[in-house]
Image (cartoon, helix red, strand yellow):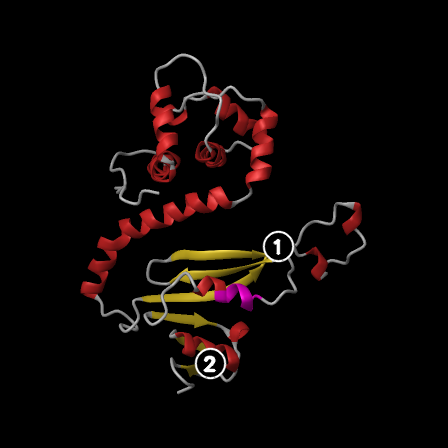
Amino acid sequence: MSHDTVFSPSKASGGVHEQIESFLQTVMRGVMRPQDQQAAAEQQGKPGRPVILPSVILWMAVLVAVLRGLKSQRAIWRLVVAGGWWKQPSYDIEDQAVYKRLEQEGYKPLVQVFERVRQLIVHWLQPALQAYHQRHAPLAPFAKQVVALDEMYLDQVSRRLPILRHFKKGDVQLLPGKLVALFDERLQQWRAIQYIASAKENGMKQAYCLLASVKAGTTLVLADLGYFSFRWFDELTDLGYSWISRGSAAHLLSSGRYL
């Protein structure tokens, strides 16, 4: 996957949706495989419709549908078949083919797209971040990255289905799960998010996986009382992370061995 595409925000006056779509076009060029790019280029201006639908085109059509307020999978199929958006060719496929692809491919193609989005935003924000540090002394200068770790429950589902009506309002069984997330404080950007299907499950295992996405030795980890555990503090220290955790007496435990 190429990572050398540079995006500059458009200076032309335009709607927010148009600017986002322009940004996503840049993203698409970065995530398309070379063979997909060649096939798309060869198709431009030629009669007939391609048979194979590249995965990145399908999922970009999903994002375009969301941006344009389209509310059904059939609307996504219409985009793919009609073509024309971002000068894309049309694809001669049945609607069921799109439904099946969306179901079978899962969320991984979107993860690739959003990771590319994250990389471009990081590149875009670097000049602003450097200018800010020239005017203000950075907090925790020993840490190249400062990340916050937290988790949250998803909103309860409505009790409309018969299998849910016997649950009382507020029952934990109505929770569709929770998210464990890692947030970059300096870039104000999500680094990683993981979904847990069971709201009762402890998110510590996912927390370790998320921390693997940042470099130990140069990262300061911020966490609240949900991660207050001396074993957790010992393991973070042994792995090389600096950390700050809020204590029950409202004091701070600074990086290291409970100084």
Q: Quadrant of the N terminus?
A: top left
> Residue 219, image x and y in percent?
35, 69
Question: What label sits on residue 155 in the rendered view?
Answer: 1
Q: Residue sitting at 38 percent across and 75 percent down?
A: 240
The mark found on residue 43 in the picture is none
Q: Is residue 162 above or below residue 175?
A: above
Residue toward you, 217 or 248 = 217
- Name the dominant secondary structure of the magenta segment: helix
Which quadrant of the figure has residue 88?
A: top left
Q: Is residue 38 left or right of residue 149?
A: left
**Would you place residue 141 above or below residue 112 in this image?**
below
Depth check: give the residue in front, 109 or 71. Answer: 109
User: How far across and down, in percent of the image, does residue 23 sit?
Assistant: 34, 38
Drawn side of residue 86 relative to residue 106, left or right: left
Q: Which residue is mark 2?
A: 234
The quadrant holding residue 259 is: bottom left
